[in-house]
Image (cartoon, helix red, strand yellow):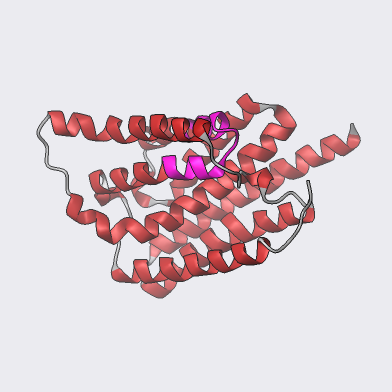
């Protein structure tokens, strides 16, 4: 019992600590969004360090990779979950606009593709692959879904365009959707990633004024970051963690 309490306390403090650092790093990145400043605080600190490397080190010490964070094979069940949730999240945003005859600025999308691919990975790896999986082990699937959705919404306080109560509540609902998709897919990170990604694309083109400005430097920085992620993945693929 004492060991479990220590584990729960450590998990709670670790997750809250990372959440706070994510908010601080994103806020600092947007405080003076020059390419170098943004790359330092957003790509390196928010992304690689706090969303990926530190949780990865935590899991590596427990020899809990890769299946424990949802790196699993896909099957029919996962495909059905992806199609249903992606259609709902994307259609829920686009269909009302189309029905009302409002223009959809698709021309904005190319500039955001690579940065959103990167950011979506960091979100899903930490909030679903790490937080939801670890909290489910300790408290069960329902509290884990709520915690995952709540932490996903609150971390957006770092973005200046998403600090209203309405935005945070909406993001809480969105986060719950991603968390439920992750659970229904058998805790498959690939599914939750590809549910989140098209939603991120559509949200960006419809609410681009709330997002940080996407520039060519953002794409270059995201490409560098993704290359680092691929190299780390190749190294991890050579490690045998056992069952």
Q: Seen from this angle, which residue lies furthest right?
A: 2
Q: Going by the picture, which residue comes out furthest to the front? A: 76
Q: In this view, does 153 lie to the left or right of 198?
A: right
Q: From the top left corner, tell me how far across and down residue 115 is, in percent.
A: 38, 60
Q: Where is 7 relative to 77, above or below?
A: below
Q: Residue drawn 78% across and 45% down?
A: 243
In the image, 139 versus 90, the foreground residue is 90
Eyeballing the image, is 220 above or below 65? Answer: below
93 relative to 21 in the view: left or right: left
Residue 222 vs 153, above or below: the answer is: below
Q: Which residue is drawn at 41% across and 31% down?
A: 85
Q: Which residue lies furthest to the bottom in this view?
A: 36
- Boundaries of the magenta span: 176-195
* Horizontal and vertical percent position of residue 103: 12, 42
Inspect this view and state whether residue 172 appears. Answer: no
Most common SS among magenta residues: helix
Quadrant where the N terminus sits is top right
Measured as percent of width and height from the top left, residue 230 is found at 54, 65
| 154, above or below 186, in the image | below
| The residue positioned farthest toward the top in the image shown | 142
- Number of callouts: 0
Residue 122 visible in the displayed image: yes
- In this orientation, which residue lies closer to the viewer: 100 or 190? 190
| Residue in the foreground of this view, choosing between 109 and 158 | 109
Determine the image quadrant of residue 170.
top left
Q: Where is residue 154 in the image (x, y as percent from the top left)?
A: 49, 41
Is 95 a magenta residue? no
Magenta stretch contains residue 181: yes
- Quadrant assignment, res 88: top left
Q: Residue at x 44, y 44 (%)?
A: 194
């Amino acid at each position: 019992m004492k060991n479990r309490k220590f584990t729960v306390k450590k998990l709670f403090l670790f997750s809250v600590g990372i959440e706070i650092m994510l908010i601080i790093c994103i806020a600092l990145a947007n405080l003076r969004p020059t390419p170098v400043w943004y790359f330092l605080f957003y790509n390196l600190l928010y992304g690689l360090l706090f969303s990926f490397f530190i949780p990865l080190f935590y899991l590596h010490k427990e020899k809990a990779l890769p299946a424990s964070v949802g790196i699993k094979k896909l099957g029919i069940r996962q495909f059905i979950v992806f199609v249903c949730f992606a259609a709902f999240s994307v259609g829920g945003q686009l269909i009302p606009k189309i029905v009302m005859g409002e223009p959809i600025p698709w021309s904005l999308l190319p500039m955001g593709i690579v940065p959103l691919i990167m950011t979506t990975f960091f979100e899903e790896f930490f909030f679903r692959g790490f937080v939801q999986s670890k909290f489910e082990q300790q408290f069960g699937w329902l509290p884990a879904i709520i915690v995952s959705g709540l932490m996903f919404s609150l971390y957006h306080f770092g973005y200046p365009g998403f600090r209203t109560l309405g935005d945070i509540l909406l993001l809480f609902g969105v986060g719950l959707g991603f968390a439920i998709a992750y659970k229904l897919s058998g805790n498959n990170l690939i599914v939750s990633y590809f549910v989140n990604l098209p939603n991120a694309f559509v949200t960006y083109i419809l609410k681009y004024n709330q997002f940080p400005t996407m520039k060519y430097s953002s794409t270059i920085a995201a490409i560098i970051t993704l290359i680092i992620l691929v190299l780390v993945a190749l190294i991890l693929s050579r490690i045998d963690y056992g069952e």
